[in-house]
Image (cartoon, helix red, strand yellow):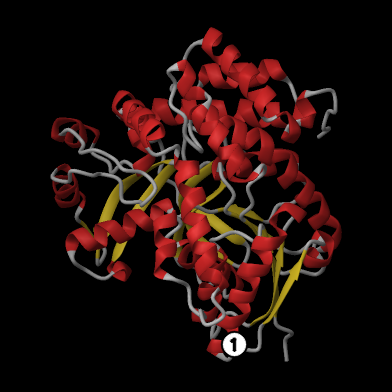
Amino acid sequence: MNKGLKIATIGGGSSYTPELIEGFIKRYDELPVSEIWLVDIEEGQEKLNIVGNLAKRMIAKAGLPIDIHLTLDRAAALKDADFVTTQFRVGLLDARAKDERIPLKYGVLGQETNGPGGLFKGLRTIPVILDICKDMEELCPDAWLINFTNPAGMVTEAVLRYANIDKVVGLCNVPIGMEMAVAELLEVDHSRIRIDFAGLNHMVYGLDVYLDGVSVKDQVIKMVTALDDNSFVKNIHGFGWEPEFLKAINVIPCPYHNYYYKSREMFEKVKQEAEAEGTRAEVVQKLEKELFELYKDPNLDIKPPQLEKRGGAYYSDAAVRLISSIYNDKRDIQPVNTRNNGAIASIPDESAVEISCVITKDGPKPIAVGDLPVPVRGLVQQIKSFERVAAEAAVTGDRNLAVLALTINPLVASDTLAKQIVDDMLEAHKKYLPQFFGNFITK
């Protein structure tokens, strides 16, 4: 009999972990997991213990023979793992709050994965993920890395370029959230909907939408134009798209496109919210406090519904569905971040893209779409340039490249402003950016 699967989750003390545990419970029949190792750092130990004990209660309630291990020892968690999932946040939510607040001083949008916030989250995260990849080479060379850590596109780009592991897939809950929202609009079950996704993480488009294999894109575009909030996800409150714009672009934008196609409105909204109730990070800190109070309840043995407010809905569905499809060689279609390999003609073959793929035991096989439509091609290429330069800056600790990356980004588009923001944020995040302060990280 085959030994059960070992899963290592880095950032195990995350409030999202009950989502993941629920996913493994639901799919236990097709995914024989025997051990789940939740690993975190010292600052996260209290949360790790709280969420880990909830995970143990959930497994006990389900009556499944899965051992949950809680540890601060990453090497022990990684040793002989079959799948490694990453969901960590370097600098915790305090760092995110700085990412969101500092740019606002300069009249620039402060957001977790876009513009300056996305750049600095990437600069802090990439050295850590590359470190994890080095450990994986040694401790679990056959394991798959399933990365959910944001900015997922930039992180996947960095792993593909600078790490020596091939088995990496980046994952985001935005595409599955879009599918669920379309299913709701059409009042049908999610299983009947398929969207052809192509683009980049948080910059992905629905090129076509199918109901039972028949295109319903025109109908969906018409329905989306009627929405007051075009967002589809809990953590972004969007606006309505102008019907003329949506009809002409003729694809389904993702929620994060609000930051690019409605930059002015989103900046004003984010600024007002930051002044009135705090940045999104500060709101999430309060939400997390409430969640962890709930998680502490020794009688709680399910994922509480309040978790959906956190913005990570469908994460377990997406993550565990992907792991199951790789393990079982399902050859179903899922949108993931992977090496382009010619699927999108206007993006370099070796770069990371977010695209619908056939999921096999050898990993995702992207479905070729040729060139992206002219109206969206330029923006996608611009963001890909930003991601590539940012990833190089993260690896080399080159301040000039950080300034260049931010200047390329359409949410900043001024070298003087980029320089000011980079210097301010480098100082604010100094503790987590040793590569920029004389302690260089080599490739």
Can residue 58 be seen here? The reply is: yes
Residue 364 shown left or right of residue 185 in the figure: right
Q: Is residue 105 above or below residue 286?
A: above
Q: Residue at left 82%, top 32%?
A: 441
Residue 100 shown left or right of residue 209 in the figure: right
Within the image, what quadrant is residue 221 found in? top left
Q: Nearer the viewer, residue 80 or 50?
A: 50
Residue 200 shown left or right of residue 74 in the figure: left
Under tag 1, what secondary structure? helix
Which residue does the numbered mark 1 point to in the structure image? 60
Instruction: Sort mark 1 into few (<14), some (14-19) or many (20+) by Cα contacts within 10 Å.
Output: some
Q: Quadrant of the N terminus?
A: bottom right
Q: Residue at left 21%, top 68%?
A: 188
Count of numbered circles on the image: 1
Q: Could you say where residue 426 lies in the image, as x and y percent from the top left?
A: 67, 24
Can residue 154 be seen here? The reply is: no
Q: Residue at left 74%, top 44%?
A: 128
Q: Quadrant of the C terminus?
A: top right
Q: Nearer the viewer, residue 442 or 294?
A: 294
Q: Could you say where residue 233 lies in the image, as x and y percent from the top left?
A: 35, 51
Residue 160 shown left or right of residue 382 in the figure: right
Within the image, what quadrant is residue 17 found in? bottom right
Inspect the image, locate mark 1, and give the three-letter code of the amino acid beneath it: Ala
Q: Residue at left 61%, top 30%?
A: 388
Q: Could you say where residue 34 lies in the image, as x and y percent from the top left?
A: 69, 82
Q: Is residue 277 above or below residue 41?
A: above
Q: Could you say where residue 265 lies in the image, as x and y percent from the top left?
A: 29, 27
